[in-house]
Every structure is written in C-alpha cells, then in structure tokens.
Image: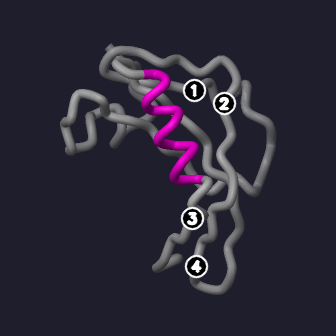
Amino acid sequence: MSKLIRFEKTVADSILTAAMSAYPRETILMLQGKKVGDEIKLNNVLIPPLATYGHGFSALLGSMLPWDLTVMGVAHSHPSGVLKPSTHDLNPQSTPT
C-alpha cells in the first residue's frame, strides 16, 4: 500500500476550478497518475463522461469509463462545507438520494 500521495499543482488547480465551476453542486473528477516506489504521483485530471453533478451528491457511470490503469482515484467536492464523508462516499454502490 502506498504511504504517500503527491500531486502536481496543476492537479490541485484543476480540482479547485472544477469545484468552483459546479458550485453549488458537487463535482467529480478522475485522478490520473502512476505509482513510483511507495508513492502515488498524480499528474492529470480527467472529466468522467456522463457524470452527474447534483446538490448533495455527484456520480459517475462505471460502465462509461475507459479501461485505464493510470486512473488512481477520484476527487469530488462538498460545497455544503460538511467535512465528513457521506454514506455514498463510503459505499459508492449505493444510489444517491
């Protein structure tokens, strides 16, 4: 398991820009990068096709995603200011309400 995740400034800027553009709705992005030793280095942000940006949730359709082993994770916003993960964040198979 990787102990350290590093990301380029452009990745952070892209996440913040997407969150501000979607406000007051949540946004979701895929994070692209590579594993180097015990580190994960994120260097790109992808916008998932047919993603849903809602009030209190965001979702992507796994069936619409390309097979891409460089996708290391996702980022999404919580514009409500709640810093705790939602039930859907912890259990992505559940349906957002």
Q: What element carries label 4?
A: strand
Identify the residue position indicated by label 3 in the image: 7
Q: Which amino acid does label 1 sit on?
A: Leu
Q: Earlier in the sequence, mark 1 or mark 2?
A: 2
Q: Which amino acid does label 3 sit on?
A: Phe
CB-based contact (under 8 Å), mark 1 and mark 2? yes
Residue 37 percent location from the top left of the image: 65, 86
Identify the residue position indicated by label 1 in the image: 60
Q: How far apart are marks 1 and 4 (CA)?
A: 26 Å
* Relative horizontal placement of residue 27, taking residue 55 as reference (left or right): right
Q: Earlier in the sequence, mark 3 or mark 2?
A: 3
Residue 6 lies in quadrant? bottom right
Residue plotted at (57% across, 43% down): 14
Q: What residue type is labelled 4?
A: Glu
Residue plotted at (51% across, 71% down): 5
Q: Earlier in the sequence, mark 3 or mark 1?
A: 3
Identify the residue position indicated by label 4 in the image: 39
Q: What element carries label 3?
A: strand
Q: How far apart are marks 1 and 2 (CA)?
A: 7 Å
Label annotation for residue 48: 2
Residues in magenta?
11-22
